[in-house]
Image (tube, helix red, strand yellow):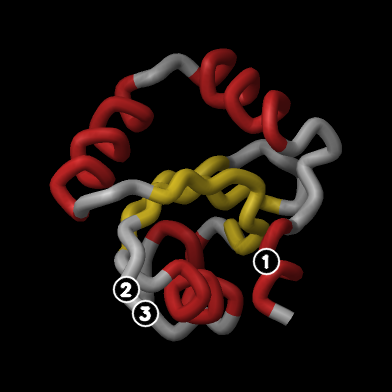
Amino acid sequence: MKQPCVYILASKSHAVLYIGVTSNLQRRVWQHKNGVVAGFSRKYNVHQLVYYEVHQSMQAAILRERQLKKWKREWKENLINGLNPNWDDLSMIFE
């Protein structure tokens, strides 16, 4: 089932964050974790799903992604801490 989502991945040390958008969060997180697609997340080992938001439309999700990418690091951390204060890997929801 397609469900537009914005998500944030973090490296193990939480030093690096990656913000993305997808219509299939489970598949996309699997791709990141398995290094299927060359790019930022594979290069910097950013594989832990620490935050996500579900949206009603892809257009809304894309707008939110663009907004979050402009945010200061501190704001992104506060957003993550509000949902996931221990920065646990939320990809366990797919198991």
Structural distance between the alpha carbons of marks 2 and 3: 4 Å
Residue 8: image location, x then y, percent: 52, 46
Residue 82: image location, x then y, percent: 69, 25
Q: Residues within 10 Å of mark 2 (few under 14, many from 20)?
A: few
Q: Are marks 2 and 3 in contact (CB under 8 Å)?
A: yes
Amino acid type, label 1: Ser
Q: Are marks 2 and 1 in contact (CB under 8 Å)?
A: no
Closer to us: 57 or 39: 57
Residue annotated with mark 1: 91
Residue annotated with mark 3: 1
Give residue 61's quadrant in the image.
top left
Locate the C terminus by quadrant: bottom right
Left or right? Give the position of 40 relative to 81.
left
User: Looking at the image, which residue sits at the far right?
Assistant: 86
Q: Kindly identify the residue that appears in the image at 44 percent across and 73 percent down.
A: 28
Amino acid type, label 3: Met
Closer to us: 43 or 48: 48
Left or right? Give the position of 75 relative to 47.
left
Which element type, helix, strand or loop, lies under badge 1? helix
Residue annotated with mark 2: 2
Q: Kindly identify the residue that appears in the image at 34 percent across and 47 percent down.
A: 55
Q: Kindly identify the residue that appears in the image at 20 percent across and 54 percent down.
A: 58
Reply above or below: 75 against 5.
Answer: above
